[in-house]
Image (cartoon, helix red, strand yellow):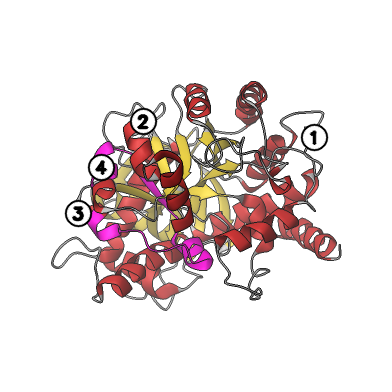
Amino acid sequence: MTQTMSLWFKSALLGSGWAKDVRFSLQAGCIACIEVGTRPIAEDEQHDIAIPGVPNVHSHGFQRAMAGLTEIAGPGEDSFWTWRELMYRFLDRLGPDEVEAISAFAFMEMLESGFTRVGEFHYLHHDPDGAPYADLAELTHRIVSAAEQSGIGLTLLPVLYAHANFGGLAPSRGQRRFINDLDRFARLMEASRAAVKSLNDAVVGVAPHSLRAVTPDELKVAISLAPTGPIHIHTAEQTQEVEDCIAWSGQRPVEWLLDRAPVDARWCLIHSTHLNAEETRRLAASGAVAGLCPVTECNLGDGIFPALDYLNAGGAFGVGTDSNISIDPAAELRALEYSQRLIHRRRNVLAGGEKRSTGRRLFDAAIVGGAQALHSFPPPFTGEGRVGVGLAEGAPADIVSLNSNHSSLISRSGDALLDGWIFAAGGGAVDCVWRYGGKVVAGGSHIEREAITTRYRSTIHRLLAQ
């Protein structure tokens, strides 16, 4: 018989809205039953505020180790492209043990901040010389091991990276660890599906890296390798990418995809920063998710996504940590709203109407769009409409409790809690986290923090001594 445990909260955000005095009965990793307006009993573990865990739609786990190491100005104008060259040099130092230790640390921090599932956009496949490991999926196994150590939900997105730029340009030396042809990539996909079987409710999708990195024919084959899974692709992150795409095809990258690829609710277009008005309208209408990474986009100087027009057109979005320069869902949502305030020179731009909470609208959108992008609930994802994920019966028990004694949450209730967390808390507001029914964060710290941090610290000492 499967053991049942119960959690009781003074306040909880359910699929139907905020409720008081809520008991969750958990069984087999899911929420088996929800009771509202009930008093706690001796068997209940009691807390104050429950909200759903946030999906992280886009991460490169190994880049966490680079955080803060690229903030010295170069001889010319720094940009994404100069940052990328530094990243290429850094990853040459990473072996399987380093990838695992860094990713486990990043995943641990995600859980501590309120993310409960990650879309790992996994493009680092081969050894430092560019040769496949004896086990083609060696680094895939290390990502899976990092997810297992931390307990985070994993949507694994193996990346097809074949070329350096539009038109099938030969890859550069710095890209040698990413490169696969279609036959080898198909084998990697099969190995990835086998690798995640040890994890609870893992998902495998596919990620053609970008229109820069795959040809149109390769794109078609790549998406055929994940007939039911999510499809993620980088698009229009930088203006140079848009200009290069126009020079190659006569079209902008998002325009090209919407015209020539079967973009629908299975797709997540990462960044999509530089959209014109027609692309904004069409992307919103396609049913796809825009995978926004506002903190990284700020850090790299990418630009600002047209969020107000996109949301007004009914578009879906999720948030991701991308380069993992900072790991915090509240920070991503705050940066998204603040970018719009700077562009439009007014406040509460994305609230969606008079007397509506900005934090609540951002949070709801990130939960719904993130779940769609990562195919996290309900399994399998059918693509028929958008999946709303709250704390609901039958859903995975991915629950975050907020600390009601945090200075930005004291004496607040309902949507004011989300506003306080997103716009004022600045860290320390997450108390406990349950992922697939197991408690992975208690008192603000991951239950394996000491072991994971010790390995990470040793790894960083070794890397930076080189």
Residue 282 image label: 4
| Residue occupying the point 26% across, 65% down | 358
Where disc 3 sits, the SS reads helix
The one of 90 and 172 positioned closer to us in this rendering: 172
Pick whichever, 87 or 116, lies toward us: 87
Element on which disc 4 rests: helix
Q: Is residue 16 above or below residue 458?
A: above
Residue 285 drawn in magenta: yes
The residue carrying mark 1 is 131
Q: CA distance from mark 3 to mark 1?
A: 47 Å
3D distance between C-alphas at marks 1 and 2: 33 Å
Q: Please identify the quarter of the rendering in which residue 346 is found.
A: bottom left
Q: Is residue 277 left or right of residue 381?
A: left
Q: Is residue 115 left or right of residue 308?
A: right
Q: Residues within 10 Å of mark 1 (few under 14, many from 20)?
A: some
The mark lying in front, picked from 2 and 3, is 2
Asked if labels 2 and 4 touch by Cβ distance under 8 angstroms, the answer is: no
What is the magenta range?
281-309
Residue named by callout 3: 312
Name the residue type under label 1: Ala
Residue 197 on image: x %, y %: 61, 27
Say which mark, if any, is on residue 260. Answer: 2
Q: Is residue 44 visible?
A: no
Q: Earlier in the sequence, mark 3 or mark 1?
A: 1
For the residues labelled 3 and 4, the Cα–Cα distance comes to 12 Å
Count all numbered tags in the image, as a single digit. 4
Say which residue appears at 33% left-offset and 45% top-offset.
Answer: 368
- Which of the two labelled residues, at mark 4 and mark 2, occupies the earlier sequence position? 2
Does dot 2 land on a helix, a strand or a loop? helix
Q: Quadrant of the C terminus?
A: bottom right
Disc 3 residue type (three-letter): Asn
